[in-house]
Image (cartoon, rainbow, N blue to C red):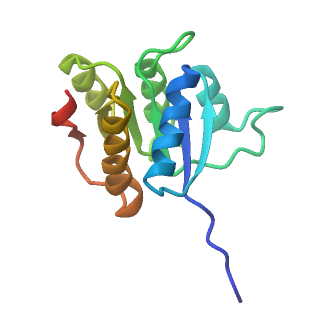
């Protein structure tokens, strides 16, 4: 019996369309081939993850969540806490991808259960490098077992 492997699914939770476009671009530049889905805030992320109708009833379960910190309606930390408190979702690795360089934001994210924290650089070439490292750490070689803060960008 032949089986077809399903693609690696990433849920990108990002309210800024330009930032989302640049993340997608950087994945393409690094030849990271995934099924990338996007929602725009924490409420939409939870609806996607819970497969709420009508928009998300057929949503795939992501293998990884890339979560922005500062978003309207429900921010990243609140969304992260909700994901990690829900038994059916808490095992999905959540990587914070934020413009915040504040060590307190990284520490709070990791304390709430984030698996990793990356700072989005403003330079497009640095962003491509950040996404390359993220891809190697979380997609190419699988998840690391301990939380990590990207020290180079914090």
Towards the viewer: 44 or 128? 128
Residue 82 in sight here: yes
Count of picture labels: 0
Reply above or below: 142 against 148: below
The quadrant where residue 8 appears:
bottom right
Q: Quadrant of residue 122?
A: top left
Residue at 24% x, 20% y is 101
Q: Residue furthest top?
A: 73
* Percent coordinates x, y for residue 46 in the rendering: 60, 29
Nearest to the observer: residue 7 or residue 47:
7
Q: Which quadrant of the figure contains the N terminus?
A: bottom right
Whether residue 103 sits left or right of residue 4 in the image: it is: left
Residue 87 in sight: no
Image location of residue 103, percent across then percent down: 18, 20
Image: 94 above or below 44: below
Point out the residue furthest to the left here. 151
Residue 107 location, quadrant: top left
């Amino acid at each position: 019996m032949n089986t077809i492997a399903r693609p690696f699914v990433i849920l990108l939770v990002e309210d800024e369309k330009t930032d989302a476009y640049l993340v997608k671009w950087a994945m393409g530049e690094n030849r990271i081939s995934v099924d990338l889905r996007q929602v725009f805030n924490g409420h939409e992320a939870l609806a996607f993850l819970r497969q709420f109708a009508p928009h998300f009833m057929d949503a795939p379960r992501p293998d990884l969540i890339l979560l922005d910190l500062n978003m309207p309606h429900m921010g990243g930390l609140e969304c992260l806490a909700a994901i990690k408190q829900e038994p059916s979702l808490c095992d999905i690795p959540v990587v914070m991808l934020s413009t915040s360089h504040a060590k307190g934001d990284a520490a709070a994210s990791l304390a709430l259960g984030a698996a990793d924290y990356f700072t989005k650089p403003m330079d497009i070439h640095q962003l491509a490098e950040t996404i390359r490292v993220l891809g190697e750490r979380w997609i190419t070689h699988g998840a690391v077992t301990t939380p990590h803060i990207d020290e180079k960008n914090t």
